[in-house]
Image: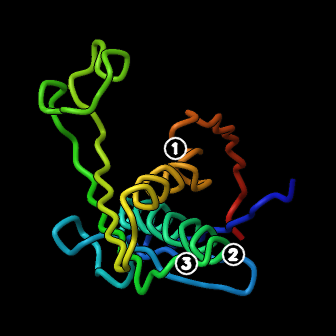
């Protein structure tokens, strides 16, 4: 399987603005002014939600194209918040066991098109198969290393 590589660079003396490079693409991340940033880019959580939303829409499009479904638009609205375990209606006991807070992502998918109930249910299932969704649910292993360089 091909790997994905992203490079991130920040000059901490210049605030929170961060340059993100992936292949030929470059974008900025930043924090809101209320947190000391300049809002020149999306926040890290906005980028996370963007990844899930884009992957969801792309995965649905592939299925819609393959099945030639009459769909005119796919909209994905996502929110992130930290909630109390007792406020998490869809959480399993394992997800809330011993936690003071739950990191909760809400994903609302709107499909515009003339679909049957069976097709709608299948699209809802297909959305759960988007690779970013699968990764988030798999508790991925993150390997960290810190390299110190002397300033020149």
**What is the quadrant of residue 55 in the picture?**
bottom right
On the picture, is 63 further left or further right than 116?
right
Task: State which mark lies toward you, 3 or 1.
Answer: 1
* CA separation in Å, label 2 and label 3: 10 Å
Q: Secondary structure at mark 2?
A: strand
Residue depicted at x 42% and y 76%: 17
Q: Secondary structure at mark 1?
A: helix
For marks 2 and 1, the one nearer the N-term is 2
On the picture, is 12 further left or further right than 55?
left
Residue at far right of view: 1
On the picture, is 108 further left or further right than 72?
left
Nearest the viewer among 64 and 88 is 64
Task: State which mark lies toward you, 2 or 3.
Answer: 2
Percent position (x, y) of residue 38?
29, 81
Residue depicted at x 58% and y 35%: 138
Residue depicted at x 50% and y 64%: 56
Nearest the viewer among 59 and 137 is 59
Nearest the viewer among 59 and 34 is 59
The residue wearing badge 2 is 22
The residue wearing badge 3 is 19
Q: How is the image coloured?
A: rainbow
**What is the quadrant of residue 64 in the picture?**
bottom right
* CA separation in Å, label 3 and label 1: 24 Å
Percent position (x, y) of residue 132?
56, 54
Nearest the viewer among 56 and 36 is 56
On the picture, is 74 further left or further right than 141?
left
Mark identifier at residue 136: 1
Percent position (x, y) of residue 83?
17, 37
Looking at the picture, does residue 127 appear above or below residue 90? below
For marks 3 and 1, the one nearer the N-term is 3
Looking at the picture, does residue 101 appear above or below residue 40? above
Q: Secondary structure at mark 3?
A: strand
């Amino acid at each position: 399987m091909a790997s994905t590589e992203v490079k991130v660079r920040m000059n901490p003396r210049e605030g929170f603005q961060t340059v993100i490079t992936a292949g030929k693409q470059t974008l900025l991340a930043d924090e809101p002014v209320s947190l000391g940033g300049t809002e020149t880019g999306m926040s890290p959580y906005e980028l996370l939600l963007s990844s899930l939303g884009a992957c969801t829409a792309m995965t649905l499009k592939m299925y819609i194209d393959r099945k030639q479904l009459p769909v005119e638009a796919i909209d994905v609205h996502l929110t992130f918040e930290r909630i109390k375990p007792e406020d998490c209606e869809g959480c399993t006991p394992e997800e809330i066991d011993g936690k003071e807070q739950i990191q909760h992502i809400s994903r609302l998918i709107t499909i515009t098109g003339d679909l049957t109930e069976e097709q709608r249910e299948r699209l809802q299932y297909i959305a759960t198969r988007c690779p970013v969704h699968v990764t988030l649910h798999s508790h991925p292993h993150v390997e960290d290393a810190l390299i110190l360089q002397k300033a020149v």
